[in-house]
Amino acid sequence: MQIARNPALADIRVEDDRTGLSIETLKRAFLDNLFYIQGKFPRLASKNDYYMALAYTVRDRLLQRWLSTAATYTENASRTVAYLSAEFLMGPQLGNNLINLGIYDAVKQAVEELGLDLDELLEQEDEPGLGNGGLGRLAACFLDSLATLEIPAIGYGIRYEFGIFSQGIRDGWQVEITDKWLSRGNPWELARPEWAVEVKLGGHTETYTDEHGQRRVRWVPYEVVKGVPYDTPLLGYRTNNCNTLRLWSAEAPESFDFEAFNSGDYLGAVYDKVTSENLSKVLYPNDNLSQGKRLRLAQQIFFVSCSLQDMLRILQQQQVPITDFAKKFTIQLNDTHPSIAIAELMRLLVDERGLPWDLAWQITQNSFAYTNHTLLPEALECWDLAMFEQMLPRHLQIIYEINHHFLEAVRAKFPNDNDRVARMSLIDENNGRRVRMAHLACVGSHAINGVAALHTELLKQDVLRDFYEMYPEKFQNKTNGVTPRRFVLLSNPRLSKLITGKIGDNWVRHLDDLRQLESYVEDASFREEWWKTKHTIKEELAAYIKQHNGITVDPYSIFDIQAKRFHEYKRQHLNAMHIVTLYNRIKRNPNIDITPRTFIFGGKAAPGYFIAKLIIKLINSIAEVVNNDPDVRDRLKVVFLENYSVKFAQRVYPAADLSEQISTAGKEASGTGNMKFALNGALTIGTLDGANVEIREEVGAENFFLFGLTAQDVYALRASGYDPSHYYHNDWELKEVIDRIASGDFSRGDRNLFQPLLESLLNWDTYLLLADYRFYVDCQERVSQAYRNREHWTRMSILNSARMGKFSSDRSVRDYCRDIWKVQPVKVSLDKQLF
Ligand SMILES: *Cc1c(COP(=O)(O)O)cnc(C)c1O
């Protein structure tokens, strides 16, 4: 609100078109943006024009808060979290911004009064799919929680021109379609070309003596790439704190263009420009796999160097001395992807700012903390040393120097233990020389954390054991969480309304308050409402499935959902084996009494991961047979929902009765899908893996379907010489499942199609499906029995939601703030004079 300046009008309050929140003002601003930004009048405007006009209307309201936030943080030179992540899987922005601004209902009414439907406009938004799965989504949840908790923070990453591919399904196979998410423009970002920086690549190093007689190193690069920041404002829930997601886009620097141009090599200059731009062209679509590709390393140094230079610029702008770098910034490394930052900050401090090594090292260690995300050996990044040296010659020298100091410390602590020294070295000398990024991250950080209690224990005992013995004080656990704003309030309005009607809306910020629902568990009418709400949401998903897949599903059946990346360790094929087991039982006795189920799958496979793609094909092949066999009588349905994404996740999690969290124990670091399901009232069938362990502790063992080997059992079984064929020969029902898949019954008689998958299971079974099969199938039988008692099931469902408070990302972020970041909230008010 602004007071009109004309004294004659002193009592008239005029709402500003760019900040006002009343329905009338929102309507006027919306039409204004349609006219002046989209350049359309209503009769010619498309749905996308309307979406864009609304997005700009909302962005204007964010900008007021964003600038107030920037002004406040700058004035206070606030300590700031810099969250470095190669992935941010943000999801659509419009709905979340409406929720956090508190204008969802007002905007809904405003657009209705203009004859439009908000849901249709929300549907228009192409989400920025700048991540693969859980790791990128965690970064996004943390940014929402940071702003909500009023913590100064910047998310730093890459503005990939093509995000994760769109998945299509053709003849049951996954096909990949490039994700042109920017093609219709991105209303949420602002380019900041004035803060562009340059990143060097390749070339060689030289030593020289500076004016103080100090020996210094200078890096003469082969090429230079320009990084241009694009900023997206991220508003907290009902706070004025609007933090920044700063993503770097690669461009050719003008100076390089001109040189080539003057020499007459016009096409060469254009070629260089194109290759520079390749750096931020596409997200690597691998989840939990490092391929060691050169372009990927280039992407990492690119965004890391841009981000560190940006922090140095901010430091200078706020007149903070360089020696206080670690007081101004606390930098979190989201996995090893940005861990080259440790060498890069050393280079910036020592080579470019002339700091002595020891001081620079102290600043560096005080600045960084490292989150490990995986126990899978193939996901640990190691770079071929020759390639690394070619691209980053100076960084390799710095890593050698760090390694030298580090290994001396190892020898001092563990004398005469050369094996240990070789195991811990930053350079792996055994597999063709390679640079071990996880080791660099451990040495250069003051804190190292796993993402669930079990994961952190396994890091300490196994993957990072040597580092735990070296630096026990660095290790801590920070169990993951998810934001209840996006994953309940926005995505599940029906359940949110029911909950808020009972306990008020404090749970949105204080998720522990959901505990108050426990007192309604014995209230039969509340249970009835809960069940009906879930049922309505299931009907909505059923309608979506009918529309998109042409399959009729029964909303009274168990909605049994597995939605996550396709990976052998996540064992979607174990789920498929259960489906075939039930199918076999029906074929043997068509009149068998079976609890109806709808099996729903969603998820992408990495394009180069053949077995994961074959598992998708298997599920679709089973679906084709099961869904159309008259003997089944519609009691089982199998549905594959294509193109799993955040938009999609928001539709799927609320509709689940049963959440499949069935990874091989010891393989899933945490999981966050497990949290989103349970929070929305799904029961979990799961192994003792990742955060499942803690979810079960919270919701109670009696409200969780546990099965299978423990991580210890897995180690012991492997050590004793695991023979999968033993299980095949000793469990006739298992044998029948494998034999039917092998027979061609699901592949129109083709007996070869699924052989690679079956051979791998019978000969190696790396992820122990056959060992867990019987436990799993029997546990599923308990699920089926439990579902028949609607009252009992509903009690368990309510208790799952009620007891999930721990898994809010607000709790995770508070834990990081307290134990690692040592950062305090900063209040932002809107009365600040900005002009
Ligand atoms: C939560 C989420 C994930 C992570 O799921 P997991 O089951 O923990 O692997 C992956 N993708 C999307 C889109 C998500 O929302």
Image (cartoon, helix red, strand yellow):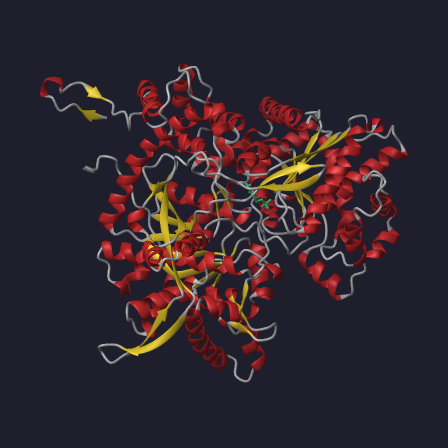
Q: Quadrant of the N terminus?
A: top left
Q: Which percent across, then down, holds residue 830?
A: 25, 35
The extreme front residue here reads 264
For this view, does 781 lie left or right of residue 806?
right
Q: Which percent across, then down, holds residue 674?
A: 59, 43
The answer to whether one can see residue 636 in this image is yes
In this rendering, is residue 389 above or below 507? Answer: below
To which quarter of the image does residue 722 belong? Answer: bottom right
Q: Which percent across, then down, holds residue 622?
A: 77, 37
Count of numbered tags: 0
Front in this rendered view, residue 171 or 551: 171
Quadrant assignment for ligand 1: top right
For this view, does 630 lie left or right of residue 461?
right
Front in this rendered view, residue 448 or 627: 627
Residue at 22%, 48% in the rendered image: 75
In this rendering, is residue 125 above or below 698? Answer: above
To which quarter of the image does residue 504 belong? Answer: top left
The extreme right residue here reads 588
